[in-house]
Image (tube, rainbow, N blue to C red):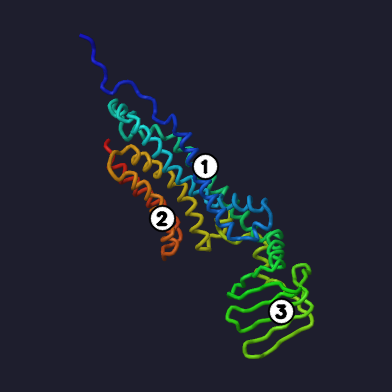
């Protein structure tokens, strides 16, 4: 009598031959989507376009880079999801299950790509994002942006003032009006002088009939405004890992530090969630996969606006990701 073969059969090839390609395509798609959103935002800033295509490309690339952690986290979810759904649709999943494959084997097969995703998340959160935020700051305060804004003003375009008023250049003078209409006037022969602007004469009239005039006027930005744009960015999002640790007395900096760590950790449960949802035949699995990113980032936004300690608020996305992955893992047949 011939010996019976093992019901499990030979160990099948891990079901990830197309996974790296799908993950790379997903990551490129995420960055492409962010770039499109950034480009749409740039269209609302005509002074950016006036500064030249080089500034536009730099600004769009930097804006996309500020979402690098989100792109890697989304790829960690969608890459496994797309791969396992293809296995299910092609019948390969059924064959693997017949050979005895379960959720544990599935997770082990994905372990190498999971480790690569963690490394990518570390690079995105601790290297790419801070650098991208610093580039955004430098573009906003660059001389090219200032020159472009001034050129648009000289061409007759109206600039909106912070209080809702307006500023326009006509006949060699800058005409202005405050937001409440209490004051109107003009500044003649404007010209730059270092960090200041010099005007030969200035006149202002109030809605109550009062008038004010000088023969020469020099204006410069407030010290805090000039320091803000001339110096390094103050936002913790633009700070490096070492700088954030030195700012441990600032609640916002502490939250940003832990948020970056949380998004690195969240890559693992999000990948597991994608595996489970893609392998599952349950109705609504794809619906859950589509809602999971919104749940994670909604938790982050709610935590930012809550009264939670900054450390706990920073870890909110990882907590939600672990919870979703645990439920999906439990509901998947062993």
Mark 3 and mark 1 lie on one chain; the one further toward the N terminus is 1
Q: CA distance from mark 3 to mark 1?
A: 51 Å
Say few, some or many: other residues with alpha carbon within 10 Å of mark 1 (under 14 / 14 to 19 / 20 or more).
Answer: some
Mark 2 or 3: in front is: 3
Which element carries disc 2, helix, strand or loop?
helix
Q: Which residue is mark 2?
A: 316
Q: Which residue is mark 1?
A: 28
Residue 253 screen position, x and y as percent: 53, 59
Say above or below: 288 vs 23.
Answer: below
Residue 249 screen position, x and y as percent: 53, 63
Residue 252 screen position, x and y as percent: 51, 62
Q: Do callouts 2 and 1 mark residues in contact (Cβ within 8 Å)?
A: no
Q: Do callouts 2 and 3 mark residues in contact (Cβ within 8 Å)?
A: no
Residue 245 screen position, x and y as percent: 55, 55
Viewer-nearest residue: 100 or 25 = 25
Mark 3 or 1: in front is: 3
Mark 2 or 1: in front is: 1
Say above or below: 46 vs 54.
Answer: below
Residue 102: quadrant of the picture: top left
Q: Which residue is mark 3?
A: 186
At horizontal 73% and vertical 77% (from top left) the residue drawn is 187
Say few, some or many: other residues with alpha carbon within 10 Å of mark 3 (under 14 / 14 to 19 / 20 or more).
Answer: many
Q: Do callouts 3 and 1 mark residues in contact (Cβ within 8 Å)?
A: no
At horizontal 64% and vertical 58% (from top left) the residue drawn is 48
Split into 4 quadrants, where in the image is the N terminus? top left
Which element carries disc 1, helix, strand or loop?
helix
Split into 4 quadrants, where in the image is the C terminus? top left
Mark 2 and mark 3 lie on one chain; the one further toward the N terminus is 3
């Amino acid at each position: 009598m011939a010996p019976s073969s093992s019901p499990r059969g030979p160990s099948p090839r891990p079901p990830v031959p197309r996974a790296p390609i799908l993950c790379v395509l997903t990551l490129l798609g995420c960055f492409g989507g962010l770039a499109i959103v950034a480009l749409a935002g740039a269209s609302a800033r005509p002074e950016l376009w006036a500064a030249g295509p080089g500034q536009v490309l730099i600004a769009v690339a930097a804006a996309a880079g500020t979402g690098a952690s989100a792109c890697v986290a989304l790829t960690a979810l969608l890459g496994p999801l797309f791969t396992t759904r293809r296995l299910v649709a092609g019948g390969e999943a059924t064959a693997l299950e017949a050979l005895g494959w379960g959720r544990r084997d599935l997770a082990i097969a994905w372990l190498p790509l999971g480790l690569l995703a963690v490394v990518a998340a570390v690079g995105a959160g601790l290297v790419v994002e801070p650098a991208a935020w610093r580039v955004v700051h430098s573009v906003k305060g660059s001389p090219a942006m200032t020159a472009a804004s001034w050129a648009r003003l000289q061409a007759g375009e109206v600039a909106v003032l912070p209080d809702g008023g307006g500023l326009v250049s006509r006949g060699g003078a800058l005409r202005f009006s405050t937001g409440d209409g209490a004051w109107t006037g003009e500044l003649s022969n404007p010209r730059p002088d270092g960090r200041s602007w010099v005007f030969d004469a200035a006149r202002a009239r109030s809605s109550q009939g009062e008038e004010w005039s000088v023969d020469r006027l020099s204006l410069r930005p407030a010290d805090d405004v000039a320091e803000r744009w001339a110096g390094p960015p103050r936002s913790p999002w633009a700070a490096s890992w070492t700088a954030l640790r030195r700012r441990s007395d600032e609640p916002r900096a502490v939250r940003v530090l832990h948020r970056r760590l949380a998004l690195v950790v969240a890559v693992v449960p999000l990948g597991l969630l994608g595996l489970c949802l893609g392998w599952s035949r349950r109705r609504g699995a794809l619906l859950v996969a589509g809602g999971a990113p919104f749940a994670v980032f909604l938790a982050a936004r709610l935590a930012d606006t809550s009264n939670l300690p900054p450390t706990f608020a920073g870890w909110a996305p990882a907590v939600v990701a672990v919870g979703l992955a645990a439920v999906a893992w439990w509901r998947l047949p062993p």
